[in-house]
Amino acid sequence: MTMARHASALARLVRRIADVVAECNYAQRRMIDLRIAPDAHLADRDRAPDDYAEFLFRASGVLLHEPAAAGRAHGRPVG
């Protein structure tokens, strides 16, 4: 193998490792967001809020950030 092929293979390996780490980071952040969401602690989650104040409380958790159209075009996950 030439030096250029070694460098190319190493770059691909590093890119794959970085992708796995980024995916794990995203999953960890998403799991924490879902775990601390107010809706997760309700006894009857399928019940609609009784009033506007309860609606605001339920929606007070971290919301997903939707990336710009350019980011969505490249397959980036929302969050």
Image (cartoon, grey):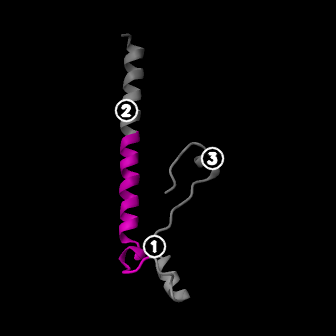
Residue range in magenta is: 19-45
Q: Secondary structure at mark 3?
A: helix
Query: What numbered label is drawn on residue 70?
Result: 3
Q: Which quadrant holds the N terminus?
A: top left
Query: What numbered label is drawn on residue 14?
Result: 2
The quadrant in which residue 75 appears is top right
Residue at the spot x=39%, y=22% of the render?
A: 9
Distance from disc 3 to disc 1, alpha carbons, whole Å, reads: 26 Å
Query: What numbered label is drawn on residue 61?
Result: 1
The quadrant in which residue 10 appears is top left
Q: Amino acid at mark 3?
A: Ala
Distance from disc 2 to disc 3, alpha carbons, whole Å, reads: 25 Å
Residue at the spot x=36%, y=81% of the render?
A: 43
Residue at the spot x=52%, y=47% of the render?
A: 76
Q: Amino acid at mark 2?
A: Val
Question: Compared with residue 72, is residue 64 higher up or lower down, i.e. above or below?
Answer: below
Main secondary structure type of the part rendered in magenta:
helix
Q: Position of residue 49 (x, y in %)?
A: 50, 84
Q: Please state which of residues 13 and 52 is positioned toward the viewer in this rendering.
A: 52
